[in-house]
Image (cartoon, rainbow, N blue to C red):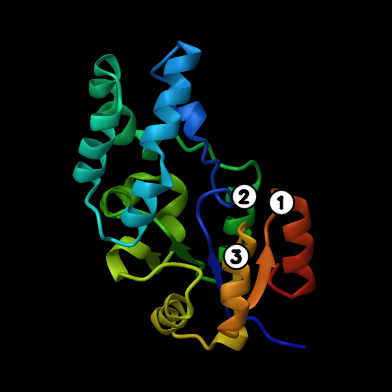
């Protein structure tokens, strides 16, 4: 049986809910405006480049504004620079992480995310116990590529075969597995994850 010595979590859809539509609905009421804003402001055209550190958050907003009707251009910035505060935690995950910590584990974080998020991550309560926190835009690597998983293990001082990676994306899970990590695909069921961690001797 493999002995897990390090646990690395993804962020969005694992620790918190990430819903662009819900974020837009905080600021807009018209259904057409919400649809347009969600489609443009959260376009992977920008977010993939943001994750890779190849595009600044300010430039992403500027580019999105060029595609938005005039009455939505100003609020686009408000939504973009406040979305990190609109991330409800997944029920039960905070307690699960706390239990891991109580058992002597120091969980790490590995997220494809922008530099703006990385700069403000300390303002997000659930992340206070994670160390290290590895953000793609900062390190210049992204999941599911092998090098970011190797880098994460190096930062954690762990070997891949003794490192558990938890993510909701099958693509990222496959990338981590190819890099030699133990993997668990999270489907929103915290109880099932807790059962798995208990079986691994982590809880």
Q: Is residue 26 visible?
A: yes
Please state, as top left, top right, bottom left or bottom right, where the N terminus lies in the image: bottom right
Density class for disc 3 (Cα within 10 Å; few <14, some 14-19, many ≥20) is some
Q: Which residue is depicted at the point 62% across and 56% down?
A: 168
Residue, disc 1? 190
Judged left or right of residue 191, residue 116 is left
Instruction: Name the foreground residue: 131 vs 151.
Output: 151
Judged left or right of residue 147, residue 199 is right
Residue, disc 3? 171
Q: Which residue is depicted at the point 41% across and 41% down?
A: 43
State whether residue 93 is above or below residue 131: above
Among the two numbered marks 3 and 2 on one chain, the one whose residue lies closer to the N terminus: 2
Residue 131 is situated, as x and y percent measured from the top left of the image, at 41, 67
Density class for disc 1 (Cα within 10 Å; few <14, some 14-19, many ≥20) is some
Labelled pair 3, 2 in contact (Cβ < 8 Å): no
Q: Which residue is depicted at the point 25% across and 23% down?
A: 73
Q: CA distance from mark 1 to mark 3?
A: 20 Å
Q: Which residue is depicted at the point 57% across and 75% down?
A: 176
Density class for disc 2 (Cα within 10 Å; few <14, some 14-19, many ≥20) is many
Among the two numbered marks 2 and 1 on one chain, the one whose residue lies closer to the N terminus: 2
Q: CA distance from mark 2 to mark 1?
A: 7 Å
Labelled pair 2, 1 in contact (Cβ < 8 Å): yes
Judged left or right of residue 199, residue 24 is left
Identify the disc placed on residue 93.
2
Of helix, strand and loop, which one carries label 3?
A: helix
Q: Nearer the viewer, mark 1 or mark 3?
A: 3
């Amino acid at each position: 049986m493999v002995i897990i010595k390090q646990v690395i979590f993804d962020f969005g859809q694992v620790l918190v809910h990430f819903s662009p539509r819900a974020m837009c609905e905080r600021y807009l009421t018209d259904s057409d405006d919400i649809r347009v804003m969600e489609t443009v402001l959260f376009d992977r055209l920008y977010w993939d480049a943001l994750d890779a550190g190849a595009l600044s958050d300010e430039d992403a907003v500027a580019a999105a504004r060029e595609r938005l009707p005039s009455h939505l251009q100003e609020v686009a910035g408000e939504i973009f620079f406040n979305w990190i505060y609109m991330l409800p935690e997944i029920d039960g995950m905070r307690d699960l992480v706390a239990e891991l910590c109580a058992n002597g584990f120091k969980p790490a974080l590995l997220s494809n995310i922008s530099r703006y998020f990385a700069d403000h991550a300390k303002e997000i309560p659930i992340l206070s116990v994670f160390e290290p926190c590895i953000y793609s835009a900062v390190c210049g690597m992204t999941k599911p590529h092998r090098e970011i998983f190797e880098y994460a293990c190096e930062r954690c001082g762990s070997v891949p075969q003794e490192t558990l990676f938890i993510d909701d994306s099958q693509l990222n899970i496959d990338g981590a597995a190819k890099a030699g990590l133990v993997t668990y695909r999270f489907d929103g069921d915290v109880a099932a994850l807790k059962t798995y961690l208990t079986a691994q001797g982590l809880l």
